[in-house]
Amino acid sequence: MIFPRLQGPNRTLAQLVGVVVVMASLSFAAVPFYDWFCRVTGFGGTTGVADSGSDVILDRTVRVRFDASLEAGMPWTFKATEPVMELRIGETGMAFYEAHNPTNRPIAGTASYNVFPYSAGGYFIKIACFCFTEQILQPGETVLMPVTFYVDPALVDDPEAQFVHEITLSYTFHQTPLPETQAALKTPAPATPEALN
């Protein structure tokens, strides 16, 4: 079968639909792509990862700031419960972020992150984190999400990072499509008087 060649308004409409489909596909792929890009290039102050804390703890301290933001259109509220923490380099710290879904429907989200200054990113070591893991909040639900970390003592030997006295860990939550099982459980519409008779 040969498809007829579109012309005029039909061709423009088909092109616009194609653009919408491509843009929607790219928006769903943005968070995993950003994760991959940061890990490969070190962009955005990509952190290190460890299974346990450091064996070395220095007398020198570092201030860690915790920043929280939302992608445009993400209806949650999201904040760090303690915006600043001071700890010794090598000491294990735990910070909490709070997310709340104020809507009447379940919403899924995934957090991306970065560390500033970028020169300190590789020395900010996460032991446990909620980043790049899908979170699903039910209507009205509030959750606390922990981040366990330490600042690697090797930071003091790096000519670019040794004078860093403050590190900012920033998370941004992005809305993601609900899994099919959750989408089927969406809150039903309220019954009308006619439906009750």
Image (spheres, rainbow, N blue to C red):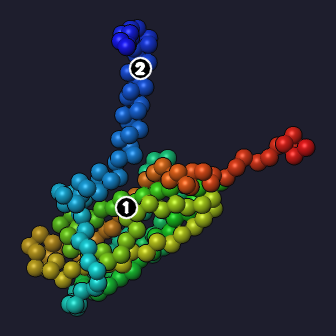
Q: Quadrant of the C terminus?
A: top right
Along the horizontal axis of the image, is 118 left or right of 21?
Answer: left
Secondary structure beneath label 1: loop
**Residue at image location 44% in from the left, 11% down from the top:** 9
| On screen, residue 157 above or below 122 | below
**Residue at image location 40% in from the left, 60% down from the top:** 111
- Label 1 amino acid? Phe
**Residue at image location 33% in from the left, 61% down from the top:** 113
- Label 2 amino acid? Ala
Along the horizontal axis of the image, is 151 left or right of 181?
Answer: left
In the picture, the disc for residue 132 is 1
- In the image, residue 100 lies at what x, y percent? 56, 63
Along the horizontal axis of the image, is 186 left or right of 162?
Answer: right
For disc 2, the marked residue is 14
- In the image, residue 85 lies at what x, y percent? 37, 79
- In the image, residue 81 lies at what x, y percent? 48, 73
- Residue lying furthest right: 197
